[in-house]
Image (cartoon, helix red, strand yellow):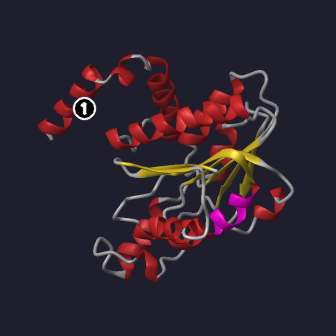
Amino acid sequence: MKFDKDLTQLISEIVTGFKRTNEIRQLYTDSARIAQDGAHDNMLKQLRYYLLHQLCAAAAEKFPNLRMAECGCWWGHSTHILASILAARPHFSGALDVFDSFEGLSEFKGQDETPYRPTEASKTAARQNFRSNFARVREALSKYSFVQLHPGWIPGKFHEVEAERFSLVTIDVDLYEPTRDALRFFYPRVSKGGFVYFDDYGYETFPGAKLAVDEFMKSERPELFLEMPYGSAFLIK
């Protein structure tokens, strides 16, 4: 544990991006406190959300009139970050559509199997761990009029935005089927030059998320697909 603590401090001290982004780190901390009372924090998550922050800001500047979508929000930590970034940009006239069951994860399929969850009890515990409270999340986000919550299992509510175009789509649903379904629906609706962010890509505890993305990319040719070393990836269409 001492090594992890010292490593985190070392990165914060010597990496330029962390030195100059006190505002970004404060937004991360404030959003975590509002959404999850500051819980569920770690260095890898901070790095992933640092990337997400930059993608959101870039998408808002590039496509100020398009919508953004978030598939999987849990308690809304990332949602608060995205909403805060958009609220600070008066030229942004789109919306942020948020899709989550608020009931935890869906069923594990064969593509999601790992030694980390060898029993049905361990799978059930993992599914229940990702439950949240829709009313609480809605209340915490109520000041953002452009945030639209779509509670329900993916892809059940996607039809509500089938006529829209998107500048950024984030996919953080952990499992194979909802990742696959989110990509199938949203990728054709992402504007050329827009972004798709995968929060779970590369995590061995959720191999189905990476598998779904890799299978989908076999038939697509985005401008750029980049895997990050701390458990996420993104593409530019």
Of 198 and 125, nearer the camera is 198
Name which quarter of the figure residue 152 lies in: bottom right
User: 151 above or below 118?
Assistant: above
Magenta region, residue range: 181-188
User: 46 above or below 210?
Assistant: above
Label 1 sits on residue: 8
Q: Is the magenta stretch mostly helix, strand or loop?
A: helix
The N terminus appears in which quarter of the rendering?
A: top left
The x and y percentages for residue 230 are: 35, 47
Q: Which amino acid does label 1 sit on?
A: Thr
The x and y percentages for residue 224 are: 54, 49
Q: What residue is drawn where x is 60% and y is 60%?
A: 221
Crowdedness of circle 1 by 10 Å Cα count: few (<14), some, many (20+)?
some
Helix, strand or loop under label 1? helix
Q: What residue is drawn where x is 39% and y is 24%?
A: 17
The tally of labels here is: 1
The x and y percentages for residue 8 are: 25, 32
